[in-house]
Amino acid sequence: MPPSTTRFRFYFAPEDELEAAEVARGWAVAGEPALSRHQRGIFVRRADNHLVHFFFNGAGEWEQWDITQQCGGMTISGDPVVSANGHQVYVRRADNHLLLFTFNAQHRWEQEDLSERPGNWLVNGDPALSPDGRSIFVRRADNHLAHFFLDDDDVWRATDLGGWVVGRPSISPDGRVVYLRRADNHFAQLFLDDNEEWVQSDISEQAGGWVIGRPASSPVGRGVFVRQADNHLVHYYFNADREWEHWDLSELAGGWAIAGDPAPSHDGASVYVRRADNHLAHFFFNADHEWEHWDVSELAGGWAIGGDPAVAHDGSGVFARRADNHLAHFFFNAEGEWEQWDVSAQAAAWASNRRPATALDGRVLVAPPLRKIERRLAGRRPEKVSKQQTSEFDWKYLMGH
């Protein structure tokens, strides 16, 4: 079996799965999920083009909150990227402005238009956020790479890095290298030289290969994974001779073609990606130092996916848009098997059963404290436990409040 993850997540099943699935049609998603490094839920574009936040609450159930509705009703047209602490979300608005949503000290979501400045700062791609949260790289409407950054006074600035960019870029863990697919389908990098100036280098010219997907790097920087022009998953890395080379992981792991963009694990030893047959696949470096591949969709019940996956940083699973446009969570359970839960259906069931009190604190109506719980469950709700037993289930407040 694939190597086990370090943490597990257990759910309370919806009491009526058919009813929950019916309600969930209005809670379907249209974009790809984005996770924060500290696991404060999932941010994604819903089918109505609203930015929404799914999170696991203190009752052991999935909830969903509509951030767009809280911030005035503007719709979005791209996929978000989230800060490490989950308090900031960057996304392209329907009018191609780059927006920053912030969860403020008043427990409310607010938005700032980063494109509202002199010059041409409309965007037509999805943003990439630097690890320190102070820089955003995104494709501008003229296909130039734009760099939005916070200056020493914490004021947002923007500069044009030029070039011809296709798709969302990826950023190295130190924030000094930006990987991107150029308009000629070459894999390229922009990096800061000793004079703190951005310089472009053509990696395809050095290591070969034409790419057609969005590059993805792991948080610890073990190379870059990308879909090649022949739909193979490839791994570019900087070798001991300080030269770029690449390996064809699809060929090494059995010849499987892919159809989406990869999502590496935190340590870069695993990669999750949508295969050409729309199954979620797991490529990993095994104990024999060889690349291997498992069909997660088949192992978890046969569910096909319709989008690119996002990997939880704590190893608790993979989130992806399923072929029916439901948000799903694939995870490796305590029995050493892959399992899958329909997050959209569970969040819809929670909403339909919710009966708010007539008088509530205004903050609760906007967003409750975002919490998660980890419990073992064997197909039913757990029995009541004594006070001495509850310490292992202490709440973890996600937003720091």
Image (spheres, grey):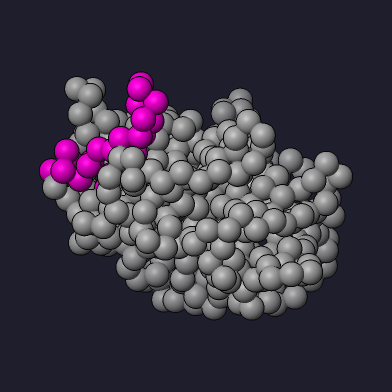
Between residues 314 and 270, which one lies in front from this camera angle? 270
Q: Does the segment drawn in magenta span residue 135?
A: no
How many marks overall? 0
Question: Left of 246 or right of it: where is 14?
Answer: right
Q: Quadrant of residue 240?
A: top left
Q: Which residues are magenta?
A: 233-254
Between residues 142 and 216, which one lies in front from this camera angle? 142
Rendered residue at 13%/47% (across/down) = 255
Residue 381, percent from left and from top: 46, 48
Q: Is residue 273 above or below residue 345?
A: above
Q: Quadrant of residue 116?
A: bottom right
Q: Is residue 233 visible?
A: yes
Q: Does the segment drawn in magenta span residue 245?
A: yes
Rendered residue at 61%/54% (across/down) = 161
Rendered residue at 70%/77% (across/down) = 73
Q: Is residue 85 above or below residue 54?
A: above
Residue 326, percent from left and from top: 41, 66
Q: Quadrant of residue 148?
A: bottom right
Between residues 150 and 80, which one lies in front from this camera angle? 150
Rendered residue at 30%/40% (across/down) = 207
Between residues 324 and 335, which one lies in front from this camera angle? 324
Question: Left of 90 or right of it: where is 119?
Answer: right
Q: Quadrant of the N terminus?
A: top left
Q: Quadrant of the C terminus?
A: top right
Residue 59, percent from left and from top: 58, 50
Q: Is residue 309 visible?
A: no
Question: Left of 205 or right of it: where is 59?
Answer: right
Residue 192, percent from left and from top: 60, 38
